[in-house]
Image (cartoon, coloured by chain):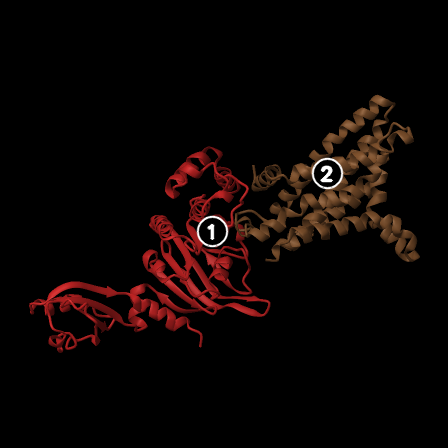
Protein backbone atom coordinates (compact mmCIF):
# COMPACT_ATOMS: atom_id res chain seq x y z
CA UNK A 1 0.00 0.00 0.00
CA UNK A 2 2.71 2.46 1.02
CA UNK A 3 6.36 2.23 0.02
CA UNK A 4 8.89 4.68 1.39
CA UNK A 5 12.43 4.52 0.10
CA UNK A 6 15.50 6.34 1.37
CA UNK A 7 13.30 8.99 2.86
CA UNK A 8 15.38 11.91 4.14
CA UNK A 9 14.48 15.30 5.50
CA UNK A 10 16.83 18.09 6.46
CA UNK A 11 15.71 21.14 8.39
CA UNK A 12 18.25 23.90 7.87
CA UNK A 13 21.15 21.47 7.89
CA UNK A 14 19.70 19.40 10.70
CA UNK A 15 18.85 15.88 9.69
CA UNK A 16 15.39 15.04 11.06
CA UNK A 17 14.81 11.85 9.10
CA UNK A 18 17.76 9.91 7.77
CA UNK A 19 17.32 7.52 4.85
CA UNK A 20 14.48 5.44 6.19
CA UNK A 21 12.77 2.64 4.32
CA UNK A 22 9.50 1.01 5.20
CA UNK A 23 6.41 -0.51 3.73
CA UNK A 24 2.89 -0.68 4.97
CA UNK A 25 0.54 -3.40 3.82
CA UNK A 26 -3.16 -2.89 3.18
CA UNK A 27 -5.25 -3.26 6.30
CA UNK A 28 -2.28 -3.04 8.63
CA UNK A 29 -2.24 -0.93 11.80
CA UNK A 30 1.26 0.41 12.08
CA UNK A 31 2.67 2.28 15.06
CA UNK A 32 5.55 4.70 14.82
CA UNK A 33 7.25 4.64 18.16
CA UNK A 34 10.03 6.84 19.37
CA UNK A 35 11.06 9.44 21.90
CA UNK A 36 10.10 13.05 21.32
CA UNK A 37 12.02 14.60 18.46
CA UNK A 38 12.89 11.25 16.89
CA UNK A 39 11.39 12.18 13.54
CA UNK A 40 7.94 10.60 13.82
CA UNK A 41 5.97 13.73 13.01
CA UNK A 42 8.35 14.65 10.20
CA UNK A 43 7.88 11.23 8.63
CA UNK A 44 4.09 11.44 8.88
CA UNK A 45 4.13 14.95 7.44
CA UNK A 46 6.08 13.73 4.44
CA UNK A 47 3.66 10.86 4.06
CA UNK A 48 0.68 13.21 3.95
CA UNK A 49 2.36 15.62 1.55
CA UNK A 50 2.47 18.48 4.04
CA UNK A 51 6.23 18.80 3.66
CA UNK A 52 8.35 17.60 0.82
CA UNK A 53 11.17 15.11 1.45
CA UNK A 54 14.70 16.39 0.89
CA UNK A 55 15.32 13.15 -0.96
CA UNK A 56 13.80 9.71 -1.35
CA UNK A 57 10.44 8.61 -2.61
CA UNK A 58 7.07 7.70 -1.20
CA UNK A 59 4.61 5.75 -3.23
CA UNK A 60 1.03 5.23 -2.14
CA UNK A 61 -0.50 2.43 -4.19
CA UNK A 62 1.22 3.33 -7.43
CA UNK A 63 1.02 7.09 -7.00
CA UNK A 64 4.11 9.16 -6.40
CA UNK A 65 3.71 11.68 -3.60
CA UNK A 66 5.51 14.45 -5.49
CA UNK A 67 3.90 13.99 -8.87
CA UNK A 68 0.37 13.08 -7.80
CA UNK A 69 0.07 14.80 -4.46
CA UNK A 70 -3.60 15.63 -4.87
CA UNK A 71 -4.52 12.05 -5.78
CA UNK A 72 -2.60 10.74 -2.78
CA UNK A 73 -4.31 13.23 -0.48
CA UNK A 74 -7.68 11.94 -1.62
CA UNK A 75 -6.73 8.47 -0.35
CA UNK A 76 -5.47 9.78 2.97
CA UNK A 77 -7.14 11.05 6.09
CA UNK A 78 -4.77 12.93 8.35
CA UNK A 79 -5.09 14.08 11.94
CA UNK A 80 -2.13 16.26 12.93
CA UNK A 81 -0.84 16.35 16.48
CA UNK A 82 -3.21 17.98 18.99
CA UNK A 83 -5.96 18.35 16.35
CA UNK A 84 -5.53 21.95 15.17
CA UNK A 85 -9.11 22.61 14.05
CA UNK A 86 -10.72 26.00 13.45
CA UNK A 87 -11.77 27.20 16.89
CA UNK A 88 -14.43 29.61 15.74
CA UNK A 89 -16.51 27.01 13.87
CA UNK A 90 -19.29 24.78 15.11
CA UNK A 91 -18.51 21.07 14.97
CA UNK A 92 -21.31 20.51 12.46
CA UNK A 93 -20.21 23.40 10.24
CA UNK A 94 -16.64 22.22 10.33
CA UNK A 95 -17.42 18.64 9.36
CA UNK A 96 -19.81 19.88 6.69
CA UNK A 97 -17.04 22.10 5.30
CA UNK A 98 -14.56 19.20 5.23
CA UNK A 99 -17.12 16.98 3.51
CA UNK A 100 -17.62 19.56 0.79
CA UNK A 101 -13.92 20.28 0.31
CA UNK A 102 -13.51 16.53 -0.11
CA UNK A 103 -16.25 16.64 -2.72
CA UNK A 104 -18.70 14.24 -1.15
CA UNK A 105 -22.00 14.00 -3.00
CA UNK A 106 -24.23 16.73 -1.52
CA UNK A 107 -26.94 14.15 -0.84
CA UNK A 108 -24.56 11.88 1.05
CA UNK A 109 -23.10 14.55 3.33
CA UNK A 110 -25.77 14.38 6.01
CA UNK A 111 -25.88 10.57 6.28
CA UNK A 112 -22.09 10.54 6.41
CA UNK A 113 -22.03 13.12 9.21
CA UNK A 114 -24.61 11.05 11.13
CA UNK A 115 -22.54 7.92 10.68
CA UNK A 116 -19.36 9.64 11.89
CA UNK A 117 -21.12 11.31 14.80
CA UNK A 118 -22.25 7.84 15.80
CA UNK A 119 -18.86 6.23 15.44
CA UNK A 120 -16.97 8.99 17.25
CA UNK A 121 -19.66 9.82 19.79
CA UNK A 122 -20.22 13.41 18.70
CA UNK A 123 -23.99 13.46 19.02
CA UNK A 124 -24.22 15.94 21.87
CA UNK A 125 -21.57 18.40 20.77
CA UNK A 126 -22.51 18.77 17.11
CA UNK A 127 -23.66 22.36 17.65
CA UNK A 128 -20.91 23.58 19.94
CA UNK A 129 -17.99 25.73 18.86
CA UNK A 130 -14.82 23.65 18.51
CA UNK A 131 -12.91 26.11 20.69
CA UNK A 132 -15.10 25.23 23.68
CA UNK A 133 -14.59 21.46 23.49
CA UNK A 134 -12.48 19.42 25.88
CA UNK A 135 -9.33 17.89 24.48
CA UNK A 136 -10.90 14.46 24.19
CA UNK A 137 -13.83 15.73 22.19
CA UNK A 138 -11.57 17.83 20.00
CA UNK A 139 -9.56 14.71 19.23
CA UNK A 140 -12.77 12.88 18.33
CA UNK A 141 -13.83 15.66 16.00
CA UNK A 142 -10.36 15.41 14.48
CA UNK A 143 -10.85 11.68 13.96
CA UNK A 144 -14.23 12.27 12.34
CA UNK A 145 -12.62 14.86 10.09
CA UNK A 146 -9.89 12.42 9.06
CA UNK A 147 -12.40 9.69 8.27
CA UNK A 148 -14.73 11.95 6.33
CA UNK A 149 -14.22 10.56 2.85
CA UNK A 150 -13.86 7.00 4.17
CA UNK A 151 -10.18 7.04 3.14
CA UNK A 152 -8.20 3.86 2.68
CA UNK A 153 -5.34 5.16 4.80
CA UNK A 154 -5.59 7.01 8.08
CA UNK A 155 -2.58 8.85 9.44
CA UNK A 156 -2.85 9.87 13.09
CA UNK A 157 -0.13 11.84 14.83
CA UNK A 158 -0.14 11.15 18.57
CA UNK A 159 -3.90 10.59 18.69
CA UNK A 160 -4.02 10.08 22.45
CA UNK A 161 -1.48 12.56 23.75
CA UNK A 162 -2.76 14.78 26.52
CA UNK A 163 -5.93 12.79 27.13
CA UNK A 164 -7.08 11.27 30.40
CA UNK A 165 -7.19 7.47 30.76
CA UNK A 166 -10.89 7.22 29.94
CA UNK A 167 -10.52 9.30 26.83
CA UNK A 168 -7.47 7.30 25.79
CA UNK A 169 -9.48 4.10 26.06
CA UNK A 170 -12.29 5.59 23.96
CA UNK A 171 -9.96 6.82 21.23
CA UNK A 172 -8.21 3.44 21.17
CA UNK A 173 -11.53 1.68 20.74
CA UNK A 174 -12.33 3.90 17.78
CA UNK A 175 -8.92 3.30 16.23
CA UNK A 176 -9.25 -0.45 16.67
CA UNK A 177 -12.69 -0.31 15.11
CA UNK A 178 -11.34 1.55 12.08
CA UNK A 179 -8.26 -0.66 11.90
CA UNK A 180 -10.38 -3.67 11.02
CA UNK A 181 -10.92 -2.43 7.49
CA UNK A 182 -8.47 0.40 6.93
CA UNK A 183 -4.76 0.93 6.90
CA UNK A 184 -3.88 3.00 9.94
CA UNK A 185 -0.55 4.64 10.69
CA UNK A 186 -0.20 6.28 14.07
CA UNK A 187 2.66 7.72 16.04
CA UNK A 188 3.15 7.71 19.76
CA UNK A 189 5.79 7.66 22.43
CA UNK A 190 3.70 5.43 24.65
CA UNK A 191 4.56 1.76 24.41
CA UNK A 192 1.42 0.25 25.78
CA UNK A 193 -0.49 2.17 23.15
CA UNK A 194 1.32 0.39 20.34
CA UNK A 195 0.83 -2.96 22.02
CA UNK A 196 -2.85 -2.26 22.51
CA UNK A 197 -3.69 -1.02 19.03
CA UNK A 198 -1.05 -1.93 16.47
CA UNK A 199 -0.26 -5.00 14.41
CA UNK A 200 3.26 -3.85 13.84
CA UNK A 201 5.61 -1.22 15.14
CA UNK A 202 8.52 0.77 13.83
CA UNK A 203 10.82 2.11 16.49
CA UNK A 204 12.45 5.25 15.26
CA UNK A 205 15.30 7.08 16.89
CA UNK A 206 17.25 10.09 15.69
CA UNK A 207 15.69 9.81 12.28
CA UNK A 208 16.51 6.16 11.77
CA UNK A 209 14.45 3.02 12.10
CA UNK A 210 16.02 0.92 14.83
CA UNK A 211 13.45 -1.86 15.01
CA UNK A 212 10.60 -3.14 12.87
CA UNK A 213 8.15 -5.90 13.66
CA UNK A 214 5.28 -6.91 15.91
CA UNK A 215 5.66 -6.89 19.68
CA UNK A 216 6.35 -10.60 19.97
CA UNK A 217 8.98 -10.73 17.23
CA UNK A 218 10.71 -7.72 18.65
CA UNK A 219 10.87 -9.31 22.05
CA UNK A 220 12.27 -12.48 20.62
CA UNK A 221 14.77 -10.97 18.24
CA UNK A 222 16.06 -8.25 20.47
CA UNK A 223 16.46 -10.36 23.57
CA UNK A 224 14.94 -8.70 26.54
CA UNK A 225 13.56 -10.65 29.43
CA UNK A 226 10.17 -11.60 30.71
CA UNK A 227 9.41 -11.31 34.38
CA UNK A 228 6.95 -13.67 36.06
CA UNK A 229 5.80 -12.61 39.46
CA UNK A 230 4.31 -15.12 41.89
CA UNK A 231 2.69 -14.65 45.25
CA UNK A 232 2.67 -17.87 47.22
CA UNK A 233 1.13 -18.70 50.55
CA UNK A 234 1.67 -21.37 53.12
CA UNK A 235 5.39 -21.85 52.72
CA UNK A 236 8.76 -21.08 54.19
CA UNK A 237 10.98 -19.08 51.80
CA UNK A 238 13.81 -21.50 52.57
CA UNK A 239 11.74 -24.31 51.10
CA UNK A 240 11.79 -22.83 47.60
CA UNK A 241 15.20 -24.28 46.86
CA UNK A 242 15.75 -24.86 43.19
CA UNK A 243 12.17 -25.75 42.44
CA UNK A 244 11.88 -22.93 39.91
CA UNK A 245 15.49 -22.18 39.06
CA UNK A 246 15.92 -25.73 37.82
CA UNK A 247 13.42 -25.00 35.06
CA UNK A 248 14.90 -24.51 31.63
CA UNK A 249 14.52 -20.86 30.71
CA UNK A 250 14.52 -19.33 34.17
CA UNK A 251 17.48 -17.00 34.37
CA UNK A 252 17.19 -15.52 37.84
CA UNK A 253 15.10 -15.85 40.94
CA UNK A 254 14.49 -13.08 43.42
CA UNK A 255 12.58 -13.37 46.64
CA UNK A 256 10.88 -10.12 47.51
CA UNK A 257 9.77 -9.44 51.05
CA UNK A 258 6.68 -11.35 52.09
CA UNK A 259 3.93 -9.46 53.82
CA UNK A 260 4.74 -11.22 57.10
CA UNK A 261 1.52 -13.19 56.96
CA UNK A 262 3.15 -16.27 55.52
CA UNK A 263 3.04 -15.14 51.88
CA UNK A 264 6.14 -14.93 49.73
CA UNK A 265 6.61 -12.91 46.60
CA UNK A 266 8.88 -14.51 44.04
CA UNK A 267 10.12 -12.84 40.91
CA UNK A 268 11.43 -15.05 38.13
CA UNK A 269 13.29 -13.57 35.21
CA UNK A 270 12.83 -15.78 32.17
CA UNK A 271 13.88 -16.02 28.58
CA UNK A 272 11.36 -14.25 26.37
CA UNK A 273 10.89 -17.00 23.81
CA UNK A 274 9.40 -19.55 26.23
CA UNK A 275 6.10 -19.31 28.03
CA UNK A 276 6.82 -20.91 31.40
CA UNK A 277 3.57 -20.14 33.15
CA UNK A 278 2.08 -23.62 32.74
CA UNK A 279 5.27 -25.31 33.87
CA UNK A 280 5.55 -23.10 36.92
CA UNK A 281 1.98 -23.86 37.89
CA UNK A 282 2.66 -27.59 37.61
CA UNK A 283 5.66 -27.25 39.91
CA UNK A 284 3.57 -25.49 42.48
CA UNK A 285 0.80 -28.09 42.27
CA UNK A 286 3.27 -30.75 43.35
CA UNK A 287 3.56 -29.01 46.72
CA UNK A 288 0.95 -27.89 49.21
CA UNK A 289 1.72 -24.21 48.64
CA UNK A 290 -1.06 -21.87 47.79
CA UNK A 291 -0.80 -19.92 44.55
CA UNK A 292 -2.29 -16.49 45.21
CA UNK A 293 -1.05 -14.64 42.18
CA UNK A 294 0.72 -15.37 38.93
CA UNK A 295 1.49 -12.51 36.65
CA UNK A 296 3.63 -12.14 33.57
CA UNK A 297 4.93 -8.67 32.98
CA UNK A 298 5.54 -7.35 29.52
CA UNK A 299 7.85 -4.65 30.69
CA UNK A 300 10.57 -6.14 28.63
CA UNK A 301 9.35 -4.17 25.64
CA UNK A 302 9.80 -0.99 27.54
CA UNK A 303 13.27 -2.22 28.29
CA UNK A 304 13.96 -2.80 24.61
CA UNK A 305 12.61 0.62 23.78
CA UNK A 306 14.88 2.28 26.32
CA UNK A 307 17.87 0.28 25.16
CA UNK A 308 17.27 1.27 21.55
CA UNK A 309 16.52 4.89 22.08
CA UNK A 310 18.80 5.92 24.89
CA UNK A 311 21.31 8.60 24.11
CA UNK A 312 24.76 7.17 23.36
CA UNK B 1 -19.09 23.62 -6.03
CA UNK B 2 -15.37 23.16 -5.92
CA UNK B 3 -13.07 23.25 -2.91
CA UNK B 4 -12.08 26.84 -3.76
CA UNK B 5 -15.65 27.98 -3.22
CA UNK B 6 -15.69 26.17 0.12
CA UNK B 7 -12.52 27.93 1.26
CA UNK B 8 -14.05 31.23 0.20
CA UNK B 9 -17.33 30.58 2.00
CA UNK B 10 -15.69 29.42 5.21
CA UNK B 11 -13.32 32.36 5.29
CA UNK B 12 -15.97 34.94 4.51
CA UNK B 13 -18.33 33.58 7.18
CA UNK B 14 -15.59 33.49 9.79
CA UNK B 15 -15.09 37.25 9.38
CA UNK B 16 -18.54 37.76 10.76
CA UNK B 17 -18.25 35.22 13.57
CA UNK B 18 -15.55 37.25 15.26
CA UNK B 19 -15.92 41.00 15.83
CA UNK B 20 -13.09 41.80 13.37
CA UNK B 21 -15.33 42.52 10.40
CA UNK B 22 -17.60 44.85 12.36
CA UNK B 23 -14.72 46.74 13.94
CA UNK B 24 -12.85 47.20 10.66
CA UNK B 25 -16.00 48.27 8.82
CA UNK B 26 -16.93 50.71 11.58
CA UNK B 27 -13.49 52.29 11.67
CA UNK B 28 -13.35 52.57 7.90
CA UNK B 29 -16.73 54.26 7.69
CA UNK B 30 -15.88 56.61 10.54
CA UNK B 31 -12.56 57.71 9.05
CA UNK B 32 -13.76 57.90 5.47
CA UNK B 33 -16.99 59.66 6.46
CA UNK B 34 -15.27 62.22 8.66
CA UNK B 35 -12.63 63.20 6.12
CA UNK B 36 -15.18 63.34 3.35
CA UNK B 37 -17.97 65.29 4.98
CA UNK B 38 -16.11 67.72 7.21
CA UNK B 39 -14.77 69.84 4.31
CA UNK B 40 -17.64 68.85 1.98
CA UNK B 41 -19.72 72.01 2.40
CA UNK B 42 -16.66 74.26 2.14
CA UNK B 43 -15.97 72.97 -1.39
CA UNK B 44 -19.60 73.38 -2.25
CA UNK B 45 -19.35 70.83 -5.08
CA UNK B 46 -21.66 67.91 -5.68
CA UNK B 47 -18.98 65.26 -6.23
CA UNK B 48 -17.38 62.35 -4.42
CA UNK B 49 -13.94 63.44 -5.56
CA UNK B 50 -12.71 64.03 -2.04
CA UNK B 51 -13.84 60.63 -0.87
CA UNK B 52 -11.94 58.86 -3.62
CA UNK B 53 -8.84 61.04 -3.22
CA UNK B 54 -8.43 59.83 0.31
CA UNK B 55 -9.33 56.22 -0.40
CA UNK B 56 -5.82 54.86 -1.19
CA UNK B 57 -4.49 56.23 2.09
CA UNK B 58 -7.39 54.76 4.10
CA UNK B 59 -7.16 51.42 2.30
CA UNK B 60 -3.42 51.25 2.98
CA UNK B 61 -4.31 50.71 6.64
CA UNK B 62 -7.75 49.12 6.52
CA UNK B 63 -7.07 46.39 3.97
CA UNK B 64 -4.02 44.98 5.82
CA UNK B 65 -6.24 44.74 8.91
CA UNK B 66 -8.64 42.62 6.87
CA UNK B 67 -5.94 40.36 5.43
CA UNK B 68 -3.53 40.00 8.33
CA UNK B 69 -5.13 36.91 9.83
CA UNK B 70 -5.84 35.00 6.65
CA UNK B 71 -2.74 32.82 6.57
CA UNK B 72 -0.75 33.93 9.63
CA UNK B 73 -3.45 32.70 12.00
CA UNK B 74 -3.61 29.32 10.30
CA UNK B 75 0.12 28.95 10.61
CA UNK B 76 0.02 29.98 14.25
CA UNK B 77 -2.80 27.59 15.18
CA UNK B 78 -1.34 24.78 13.09
CA UNK B 79 -4.61 24.45 11.20
CA UNK B 80 -2.76 25.03 7.94
CA UNK B 81 -1.44 21.51 8.39
CA UNK B 82 -4.98 20.26 7.92
CA UNK B 83 -5.88 22.77 5.22
CA UNK B 84 -2.83 21.96 3.12
CA UNK B 85 -3.23 18.20 3.39
CA UNK B 86 -6.82 18.29 2.19
CA UNK B 87 -7.16 17.49 -1.50
CA UNK B 88 -6.99 21.07 -2.74
CA UNK B 89 -4.13 22.96 -4.32
CA UNK B 90 -2.16 25.75 -2.64
CA UNK B 91 -3.41 27.96 -5.42
CA UNK B 92 -7.07 27.43 -4.60
CA UNK B 93 -6.37 28.07 -0.90
CA UNK B 94 -4.78 31.41 -1.73
CA UNK B 95 -7.40 32.46 -4.26
CA UNK B 96 -10.27 31.38 -2.01
CA UNK B 97 -8.93 33.45 0.86
CA UNK B 98 -8.14 36.37 -1.44
CA UNK B 99 -11.69 36.47 -2.74
CA UNK B 100 -13.10 36.28 0.79
CA UNK B 101 -11.09 39.30 1.90
CA UNK B 102 -11.93 41.17 -1.29
CA UNK B 103 -15.61 40.43 -0.74
CA UNK B 104 -15.35 41.86 2.77
CA UNK B 105 -13.81 45.07 1.41
CA UNK B 106 -16.65 45.24 -1.12
CA UNK B 107 -19.16 44.85 1.70
CA UNK B 108 -17.34 47.63 3.52
CA UNK B 109 -17.81 49.93 0.52
CA UNK B 110 -21.54 49.30 0.21
CA UNK B 111 -22.60 51.71 3.00
CA UNK B 112 -20.62 54.50 1.32
CA UNK B 113 -23.17 54.39 -1.51
CA UNK B 114 -25.26 56.44 0.91
CA UNK B 115 -22.76 59.27 0.40
CA UNK B 116 -23.42 59.18 -3.32
CA UNK B 117 -27.18 59.17 -2.71
CA UNK B 118 -26.90 62.08 -0.27
CA UNK B 119 -24.76 64.12 -2.63
CA UNK B 120 -27.16 63.40 -5.48
CA UNK B 121 -29.95 64.84 -3.38
CA UNK B 122 -28.01 68.00 -2.66
CA UNK B 123 -26.96 68.76 -6.21
CA UNK B 124 -26.30 67.52 -9.72
CA UNK B 125 -24.04 64.48 -9.28
CA UNK B 126 -22.05 63.28 -12.27
CA UNK B 127 -22.38 59.51 -11.99
CA UNK B 128 -19.50 58.72 -14.38
CA UNK B 129 -16.66 59.46 -11.95
CA UNK B 130 -18.64 57.80 -9.16
CA UNK B 131 -18.85 54.54 -11.09
CA UNK B 132 -15.21 54.91 -12.06
CA UNK B 133 -14.32 55.59 -8.46
CA UNK B 134 -16.00 52.41 -7.21
CA UNK B 135 -14.44 50.36 -9.98
CA UNK B 136 -11.05 51.87 -9.09
CA UNK B 137 -11.71 51.17 -5.43
CA UNK B 138 -12.29 47.48 -6.18
CA UNK B 139 -9.15 47.27 -8.30
CA UNK B 140 -7.18 49.04 -5.58
CA UNK B 141 -8.65 46.73 -2.97
CA UNK B 142 -7.69 43.67 -4.99
CA UNK B 143 -4.08 44.88 -5.29
CA UNK B 144 -3.80 45.68 -1.58
CA UNK B 145 -5.57 42.47 -0.56
CA UNK B 146 -3.13 40.40 -2.59
CA UNK B 147 -0.18 42.23 -1.03
CA UNK B 148 -1.68 41.78 2.42
CA UNK B 149 -2.20 38.09 1.78
CA UNK B 150 1.42 37.76 0.75
CA UNK B 151 2.54 39.43 3.99
CA UNK B 152 0.24 37.12 5.93
CA UNK B 153 1.74 34.07 4.22
CA UNK B 154 5.25 34.97 5.30
CA UNK B 155 4.75 34.97 9.07
CA UNK B 156 2.82 33.36 11.89
CA UNK B 157 2.38 36.67 13.67
CA UNK B 158 -0.66 38.71 12.66
CA UNK B 159 0.83 41.99 13.92
CA UNK B 160 3.90 41.51 11.76
CA UNK B 161 1.67 40.64 8.82
CA UNK B 162 -0.31 43.84 9.38
CA UNK B 163 2.71 46.12 9.72
CA UNK B 164 4.49 44.63 6.71
CA UNK B 165 1.42 44.90 4.52
CA UNK B 166 0.58 48.42 5.69
CA UNK B 167 4.16 49.54 5.06
CA UNK B 168 4.11 48.17 1.50
CA UNK B 169 0.68 49.66 0.71
CA UNK B 170 1.58 52.97 2.31
CA UNK B 171 4.85 53.16 0.35
CA UNK B 172 3.04 52.48 -2.91
CA UNK B 173 0.50 55.17 -2.08
CA UNK B 174 3.10 57.79 -1.23
CA UNK B 175 5.37 56.98 -4.15
CA UNK B 176 3.71 59.47 -6.50
CA UNK B 177 4.23 62.33 -4.08
CA UNK B 178 7.86 61.42 -3.47
CA UNK B 179 8.88 61.52 -7.12
CA UNK B 180 10.21 65.06 -6.65
CA UNK B 181 13.05 63.79 -4.53
CA UNK B 182 14.15 61.05 -6.88
CA UNK B 183 16.86 61.18 -9.56
CA UNK B 184 15.55 61.67 -13.10
CA UNK B 185 16.17 58.18 -14.44
CA UNK B 186 14.07 56.52 -11.79
CA UNK B 187 11.08 58.81 -12.07
CA UNK B 188 9.44 57.17 -15.05
CA UNK B 189 9.90 53.67 -13.63
CA UNK B 190 8.84 54.44 -10.07
CA UNK B 191 6.13 56.74 -11.36
CA UNK B 192 4.50 53.70 -12.89
CA UNK B 193 4.76 51.77 -9.64
CA UNK B 194 2.85 54.32 -7.58
CA UNK B 195 -0.77 53.48 -6.82
CA UNK B 196 -2.10 57.01 -6.64
CA UNK B 197 -1.95 58.15 -10.25
CA UNK B 198 -3.38 54.88 -11.60
CA UNK B 199 -6.22 55.03 -9.12
CA UNK B 200 -7.01 58.69 -9.71
CA UNK B 201 -7.13 58.10 -13.47
CA UNK B 202 -9.84 55.52 -13.06
CA UNK B 203 -11.60 57.57 -10.38
CA UNK B 204 -11.83 60.45 -12.83
CA UNK B 205 -13.76 58.10 -15.06
CA UNK B 206 -10.93 57.43 -17.52
CA UNK B 207 -10.57 53.73 -18.01
CA UNK B 208 -7.11 53.14 -19.44
CA UNK B 209 -5.80 49.64 -20.08
CA UNK B 210 -2.45 50.60 -18.53
CA UNK B 211 -4.08 51.34 -15.19
CA UNK B 212 -6.10 48.13 -15.23
CA UNK B 213 -2.96 46.24 -16.19
CA UNK B 214 -1.12 47.84 -13.28
CA UNK B 215 -3.64 46.66 -10.68
CA UNK B 216 -3.81 43.25 -12.36
CA UNK B 217 -0.02 42.87 -12.15
CA UNK B 218 0.21 43.93 -8.51
CA UNK B 219 -2.58 41.48 -7.64
CA UNK B 220 -0.81 38.71 -9.50
CA UNK B 221 2.54 39.41 -7.83
CA UNK B 222 0.89 39.43 -4.40
CA UNK B 223 -0.97 36.17 -4.97
CA UNK B 224 2.09 34.51 -6.44
CA UNK B 225 4.10 35.60 -3.41
CA UNK B 226 1.43 34.17 -1.13
CA UNK B 227 1.53 30.80 -2.93
CA UNK B 228 5.32 30.76 -2.55
CA UNK B 229 4.89 31.75 1.09
CA UNK B 230 2.67 28.84 2.02
CA UNK B 231 4.83 26.41 0.07
CA UNK B 232 7.55 27.27 2.60
CA UNK B 233 6.56 25.16 5.63
Quadrant that contains the N terminus of chain B: top right
Q: Chain of mark 2?
A: B
- Count of numbered circles on the image: 2
Q: Are marks 1 and 2 in contact (CB under 8 Å)?
A: no
Image position, residue A129 (x, y; %):
50, 40
Q: Which mark is residue A78?
A: 1
Q: Which mark is residue B27?
A: 2
Residue A166 located left or right of residue A97? left
Image position, residue B197 (x, y; %):
86, 43
Q: In this view of the protein, which residue sits in the foreground, A122 or A211?
A: A122
Assign a secondary structure to mark 1.
strand
Q: CA distance from mark 1 to mark 2?
A: 40 Å
Is A98 rendered above or below residue B230? above
Q: In this view of the protein, which residue sits in the foreground, B9 or B54?
A: B54
Q: Is residue B218 visible?
A: yes
Image position, residue B118 (x, y; %):
81, 25
Q: Chain of mark 1?
A: A
Residue B69 located left or right of residue B85? right
Q: Colour in which chain B is shown?
A: brown
Q: Residue at x 15, y 67 (%)?
A: A263
Assign a secondary structure to mark 2.
helix
Q: Colour in which chain A is shown?
A: red
Quadrant that contains the C terminus of chain B: bottom right
Q: Residue at x 39, y 64 (%)?
A: A202
Q: In this view of the protein, which residue sits in the foreground, A273 or B89?
A: A273
Identity of the residue furthest to the front in this view: A260
Amino acid sequence: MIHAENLTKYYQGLCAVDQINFQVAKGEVLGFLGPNGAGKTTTLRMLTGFIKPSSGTIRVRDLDIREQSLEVRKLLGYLPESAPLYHDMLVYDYLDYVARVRRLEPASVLPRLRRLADLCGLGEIMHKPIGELSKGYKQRVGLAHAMMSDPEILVLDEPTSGLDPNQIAEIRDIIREIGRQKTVILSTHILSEVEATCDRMLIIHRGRIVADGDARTLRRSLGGEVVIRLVLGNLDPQALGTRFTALDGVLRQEILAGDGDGTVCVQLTCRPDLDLRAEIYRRIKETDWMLLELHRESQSLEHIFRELTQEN
Amino acid sequence: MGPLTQVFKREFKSYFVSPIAYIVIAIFLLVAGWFFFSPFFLYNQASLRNFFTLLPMTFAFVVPAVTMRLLAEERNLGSHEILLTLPLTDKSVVIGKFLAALALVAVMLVPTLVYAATVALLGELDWGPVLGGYLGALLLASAFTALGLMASAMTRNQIIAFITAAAICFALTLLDRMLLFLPGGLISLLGFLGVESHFQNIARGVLDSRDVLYFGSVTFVGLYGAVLGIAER
